[in-house]
Image: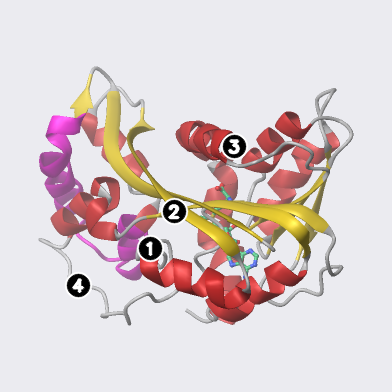
């Protein structure tokens, strides 16, 4: 998908669904956000940029960690998700950094040069159609010595939560059009060597990619059938279903249920995830 197609995608049905599901996503991804915030160097940070901030739940968590003398700016292309984020800025808890949100394409937005001392992102930097140019733009917005900290998914086959349901669904649906390797999308940054190369090329140093391998609770629904329907709202399964509005949904869901049975226990669907915690510095 080009940046223009990403704009359509995140402002269309997908963006609206993410906006509706903001509380659910915030709960699901809280442990990852905590891990990223613990891993990032936040000391002394006063002016942070959150790239691809979406509904802003991680922007708010960052603002709470930085405290009231700091400022956090969230940037995103999605109007529905930014509306949800803005509501958080409008009712900011005491002791938080100031929070503001901007609708812009982070890959080419004219940020004030050298203005941010931290660039942060939770799963918001894998969608650029020209990652080297986008990271060069982001690098230009950072002060010398500023830190970059983001998380991204490892390869799809390492991510049981995405791969197993997709394979199960494909028992009843035609496979999606083959995509070029590393095409923009959730799993575009799976290859650590490629990501390191992109960041080096953009001028970053001290690049580190630490694996985070854990399980996340994708649903707390009482039955596996309901949990699978929750899971089908996100990730590659949701994209596949959106491409096939006439899909034999009941058969697809039954296949996914069979595939995920062993991860559903006592009203919790907890699935393995494989993530990179990426940090780097602008020299
Ligand atoms: C997977 S969502 C993550 C949202 C949020 N960070 C979270 O964790 O809940 C990816 C986000 O990146 C945004 N995005 C995609 N391309 C972008 C771009 N070029 N500039 C800014 N945001 C972008 C999307 O609109 C979407 O909100």
Of the image marks 3 and 4, the number of the one nearer the N terminus? 3
Classify residue 131 as left or right of residue 203.
left
Query: Magenta region: which residues?
Result: 236-263
Q: Nearer the viewer, mark 2 or mark 3?
A: 2
Q: Distance of mark 4 from mark 2, alpha carbons?
A: 31 Å
Q: Which residue is mark 1?
A: 192
The disc label shown at residue 37, or none? 3
Q: Choose the circle earlier in sequence order: 1 or 4.
A: 4
Dot 1 falls on a residue whose secondary structure is helix
Which colour scheme appears in the figure? secondary structure
Give yes or no for residue 133 being in the magenta stretch.
no
Q: Is residue 102 above or below residue 140?
A: above
CA gap, disc 1 to disc 2? 7 Å
Q: Of the numbered discs in the image, which one, if any, rests on residue 165?
A: none
Residue at image coords 28%, 46%: 161
In three-dimensional space, the C-alpha distance between marks 2 and 3, rounded to whole angstroms, equals: 15 Å
Where in the image, quadrant-wise, is ligand 1 located? Answer: bottom right
Q: Magenta span has 258?
A: yes
Disc 4 crowd rating (10 Å Cα; few below 14, some 14-19, many 20+) is few
Q: Quadrant of the C terminus?
A: bottom right
What main secondary structure does the magenta stretch of the protein show? helix
Q: In this orientation, which residue lies closer to the viewer: 283 or 122? A: 283
Q: Are marks 1 and 2 in contact (CB under 8 Å)?
A: yes
Element marked by disc 4: loop
Q: Which residue is mark 2?
A: 209
Measure the C-alpha gap from mark 3 to mark 1.
20 Å
Q: Which mark is residue 175?
A: 4
The front one of 12 and 96 is: 96
Q: Position of residue 174 (x, y in %)?
A: 17, 72
Q: Earlier in the sequence, mark 4 or mark 2?
A: 4
Q: Earlier in the sequence, mark 2 or mark 3?
A: 3
């Amino acid at each position: 998908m080009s940046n223009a197609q990403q704009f359509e995608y995140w402002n269309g049905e997908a963006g609206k669904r993410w906006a509706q599901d903001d509380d659910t996503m915030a709960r699901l991804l809280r442990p990852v956000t905590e891990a990223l915030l613990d891993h990032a160097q936040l000391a002394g940070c006063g002016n942070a940029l959150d790239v691809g901030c979406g509904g802003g739940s991680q922007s708010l968590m960052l603002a709470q960690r930085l405290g009231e003398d700091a400022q956090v700016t969230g940037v995103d292309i999605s109007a529905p998700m930014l509306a949800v984020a803005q509501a958080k800025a409008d009712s900011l808890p005491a002791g938080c950094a100031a929070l503001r949100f901007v609708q812009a394409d982070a890959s080419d937005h004219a940020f004030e040069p050298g203005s941010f001392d931290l660039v942060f992102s939770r799963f918001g930097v894998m969608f650029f159609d020209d990652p080297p140019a986008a990271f060069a733009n982001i690098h230009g917005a950072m002060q010398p010595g500023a830190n970059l900290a983001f998380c991204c998914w490892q390869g799809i086959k390492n991510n049981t939560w995405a791969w197993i349901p997709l394979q199960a669904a494909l028992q009843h649906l035609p496979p999606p059009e083959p995509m070029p390797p590393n095409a923009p999308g959730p799993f575009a940054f799976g290859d650590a060597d490629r990501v390191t190369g992109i960041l080096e090329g953009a001028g970053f140093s001290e690049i580190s990619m630490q694996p985070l391998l854990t399980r996340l609770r994708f649903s707390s629904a009482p039955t596996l059938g309901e949990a699978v329907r929750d899971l089908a709202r996100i990730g590659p399964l949701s994209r596949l279903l959106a491409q096939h509005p006439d899909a034999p949904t009941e058969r697809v869901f039954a296949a996914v249920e069979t595939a995920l049975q062993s991860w559903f226990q006592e009203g919790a669907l907890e699935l393995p995830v494989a993530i990179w915690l990426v940090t780097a510095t602008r020299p």
